Image (spheres, rainbow, N blue to C red):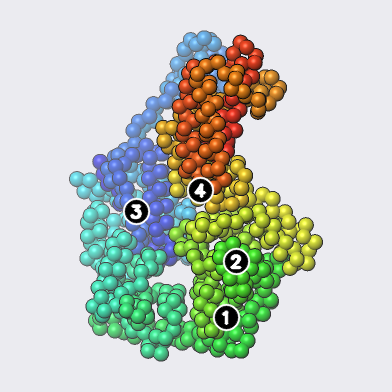
Amino acid sequence: MPDLLIELFSEEIPARMQARAAEDLKKRVTDGLVEAGLTYAGAAALSTPRRLTLAVDGLLAESPTIREERKGPKVGAPDKAIEGFLRGAGLSREQLEERETPKGAVYFAMIEKPGRPAAEIIAEVLEDCIRNFPWPKSMRWGAGALRWVRPLHSILCILSDEAGASVVDLDIDGIKSGNTTRGHRFMAPDEITVIGFDDYAAKLKRAHVVLDARERAEAIWQEAANQAFANGLEVVEDKGLLAEVAGLVEWPVVLMGAIDEEFLALPPEVLQTSMKEHQKFFSVKNPKTGRIEKFITVANRETADNGATILAGNQKVLSARLADAKFFWENDLRTAKSEAGMSVWVENLGNVTFHNKLGTQAARIDRIAALAREIAPVVGADEDLAEQAARVAKADLSSEMVYEFPELQGLMGRYYAEAAGLPSAVANACQQHYSPLGPGDDVPSEPVSVAVALADKLDTLTGFWAIDEKPTGSKDPFALRRAALGVIRLVLENDVRMSLNLVFGKAAEITGKREGASGEAFADVNDLLSFFHDRLKVFLRDQGIRHDVIDACIAMDGNDDLTLLVKRARALENFLKTEDGENLLQGFKRANNILSQAEEKDGVEYSYGADRKFAEDDSEKALFDALEAGGAAISPAIAAEDFAAAMRGMAALRAPIDAFFEAVQVNADSEVVRRNRLNLLSQIRAVCGQVADLTKVEG
């Protein structure tokens, strides 16, 4: 069984596209081969800046012969119908077979499709793949019609086995396939002839090309860490940058350079961001001080001077970049320390539109400040500090540094608030109020930060809900799902107790007043709580809580208090995992089903009137006693929000309910006894229903 090697050699492929392109090549080629009948043992795709490579092992030498029986028209059918069937089958009339069927004599065709050599199939599949490759962006060059991400220079395509290697013939717009590739652009640019993947990978390594992106990344990180350690420093980890840099070089050469002394006083985040965004440099910090002192750059070649010239050029460009950052930083600090302070930036935000239906950024800050003041007592924050923090939290959006590096918003706000002499709680809220931005992001815990973070996200949600800009399907242009998840995590991880409905109403009221509306235009937030419940289900499902358990708890009063809701759901989830919980659920469902059917049949509601004196069986009497004791235990436990105790009260009902159903027929001959027992079932539903709506629990 031969092995297949494909390489598409081109000008430099953008780093961000390489991994996806390698996977696309693998999927499109292997899918095409399998569809044509060529199975294989394994496949691997690799990429460098100049090449996409696919190695397929254990490929069939040819596709199998396929025999297919096809049923045709009836014997005696019109000639046109028979001729059409013959054309589709590629046969003559003499090759048809007549068979008797329950519906009469029918023509059958036995169609045989002979297998084809692997090379023939590969050529077709690869040409289709190249001509229809899904690059995010592509280009044409010269006079040809072929489109590729960058000009395509050569196609290596060979089949190899014990007998040797053969080229799969292919010609795409004058680019003919062959068995050659080229090494490193500068260090080994000559042609290399290969006979298989192992030979290909080994010769490329000797020609200064590391084929595997993961191997390049590991080599870069290891060498960078070693150089930093030798200087008593450490590299700031950045997996995204590492992957990108590994896609920029075929032969990584790690070099460490120094940052001019005049820039070392810049905030480390400014240095790191500037070097990453503009130069693709790694930051190297002093672990004792946290200060960024050096940088790591990765060259694509070895040089006679061991990279000295490359480093000198990089340091010159870096100094120019950092001079700009230093200018922005010093200007911003002067503004923050001035008499007017950060209020100058807030005033400037009056000229920045947040949304044409929700006003300017300055108007939004007013709303967030008012809402933060309302939320502050709920989260244990000082109202004045919460309002002050909300008023300056977004001021840095007007600063020169954030204009240059938007990703530093919030962080720079903290630096500027500290420079302005504002309280530490206010400065921290400037940085933390955007959090959490994602599932892995830390959640603020300082009360002032929590108040402002909640106000920020709730203003966004109620505002966009009010103007009917809600998420639809996969579209969520204003990141409202992320905002809702942020509120959920802030509330749950800080054990915040508040009514979301009340907060929605207050936010809508503030929005209406600030925008000069009557209030009605901003009050339509009725289904916002349902949106929160949907996001909560996703959040809790990832933590192992079933959706039906959450639904059972959402059906209860107080479902806009997320902390209470989750507390109830966790207790119910744990209870249902026990034997008592499983059996009680079955008993409850049996009782509810019998009761619901009887109520529908009789047209009455059996919700009261069960009397112990009509009990005929000892198990019936025992159930009366158990329900009375259970109600006495469960009700105060629910009132005290001690859901574990409530579940213990539920567990005590399991045995009496089981015994009742084993010993008693609910639909007794006596109508009095029947009604009494149905009312007893109603008591089961009522007592258990204090904990959650168990009708919504599956099973």
The answer to whether residue 322 is above or below residue 640 is below
Which residue carries the number 1 mark? 399
User: Mark 4 sits on what residue?
Assistant: 567
> Could you tell me which secondary element the residue under label 4 belongs to?
helix
Disc number lying in front (3 or 2): 2
**Which numbered dot is residue 80?**
none
Considering the numbered disc 2 on the image, is that residue within a helix, a strand or a loop?
helix
Location of residue 614 in the rendering, given as x and y in whole percent from the top left corner? 60, 18
Q: What is the distance, in whole Å, between disc 2 and disc 1 at their CAs?
A: 28 Å
Residue that label 3 marks: 45
- Marks 4 and 1 sit apart, C-alpha to C-alpha, by 43 Å
**Residue sticking out furthest to the right:** 518
Q: Nearer the viewer, mark 4 or mark 3?
A: 4
Indicate the position of residue 563 as horizontal and vertical percent values: 54, 52
Res. 254 image quadrant: bottom left
- N-terminal label among 3 and 2: 3
Are the residues at dot 4 and dot 3 in contact (C-beta closer than 8 Å)?
no
Viewer-proximal residue among 84 and 184:
184
Count residues near mark 2 (Cα–Cα under 10 Å), then give few for <14, some for 14-19, many for 20+. many
Q: Nearer the viewer, residue 117 or 400?
A: 400
Please name the residue shown 57% across and 38% down the image.
Answer: 690
Cα gap from disc 4 to disc 3, whole angstroms: 48 Å
Q: Which residue is mark 2?
A: 376
- The answer to which of marks 2 and 4 sits earlier in the sequence is 2
Asked if residue 669 can be seen in this view, the reply is: yes
